[in-house]
Amino acid sequence: MAERRERYTHGHHPSVVAQHARRRADVEAWFLLPRLRVGQRVLDVGCGPGTVTSGLARAVAPGLTTGLDAAADVLVSAREHAEEAGVGNLEFVQGDVYALDYADASFDVVYANQLLQHLSAPVDALREMRRVLRPDGLLGVRDADYATMQPYPKFAEFERWNALYHAVAYANGAEPDAGRCLPSWVRAAGFERLEAQPNVVLLEGEEARIWGEAWSQRILHSAVAAQALEYGLAGQAELDELSEGWRRWSQDAEALFQFIQIAVLAGR
């Protein structure tokens, strides 16, 4: 398979990694955890800082869980988290989702959270995940749908931010509204038995404040900002305005943010 060079829309600026490190398995893999069994071997593709991966590992201990990511730097954070959390049945490796360095039928479970939305060929990636699954194995994937994102109170800068995020993602060959695409992609990859489950993410209070503050930084300093400037989709003055809009919204005591996620469980 020819090597693909994907461009990650979010990048790994500290503002991104810190937000992703807040993720936990009981929230991100709620649809998968009840199906995990002691002793299973699990692959978490696109594991990032590994906080969700640690939760998966606990669920199948002493079975081995492998967290895989294309970025070596973020795996340093993942290993540090696993050590601090005392999770021993866990390893982290750098790898390519399109060419997994594992034999056919190596894993009982393959999981990918918020990964497929960033890929230019998600069906190819899913086919590779299917290849490394055992015949009775289970796939669990979950992605957001950025078009469903809505803040309260509404603020003028939000619609422009959402349009700009979509434009940057599309320029990278990605699909920011991947959630709604997952069932079709999973079927196209050859999975015959699947369950699609939606859930609404609702952020309020402290969680809304953290979300808003994070995006006030990400729209200035992360890869989204750099790519928006590079592609000529926005200027620095506009990014400054978007950042200030997010900052102002995050300080509103009534701030609430909602969007839809779609999760899919599938068997070979």
Image (cartoon, rainbow, N blue to C red):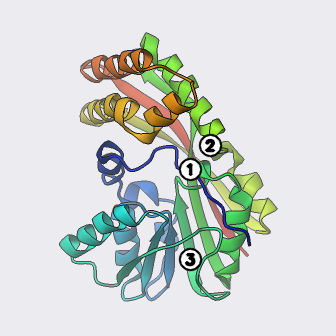
**Between disc 2 and disc 1, whose residue precedes?**
1
Disc number for residue 109: 3
Q: Is residue 60 above or below residue 11?
A: below
Q: Quadrant of the N terminus?
A: bottom right
Give the quarter of the image for residue 25.
bottom left
Give the amino acid type for the residue marked by disc 3 in the picture: Val
Give the amino acid type for the residue marked by disc 2 in the picture: Asn
Disc number for residue 172: 2
**Between disc 1 and disc 3, whose residue precedes?**
1
Q: Secondary structure at mark 2?
A: loop
Q: What residue lies at 31% left-to-right and 42% top-to-bottom?
A: 15
Q: Secondary structure at mark 1?
A: loop
Q: Position of residue 230 (x, y in %)?
A: 53, 32
Taking the view exactly as shown, the residue that stands out farthest to the top is 156
Give how far apart the Cα atoms at labels 1 and 3 are: 26 Å
Give the quarter of the image for residue 65.
bottom left
Disc number for residue 7: 1
Q: Position of residue 46 (x, y in %)?
A: 49, 63
**Between disc 3 and disc 2, whose residue precedes?**
3
Q: What residue lies at 35% left-to-right and 54% top-to-bottom?
A: 23
Q: Which one is in front, 188 or 7?
A: 7
Q: Position of residue 128 (x, y in %)?
A: 68, 72
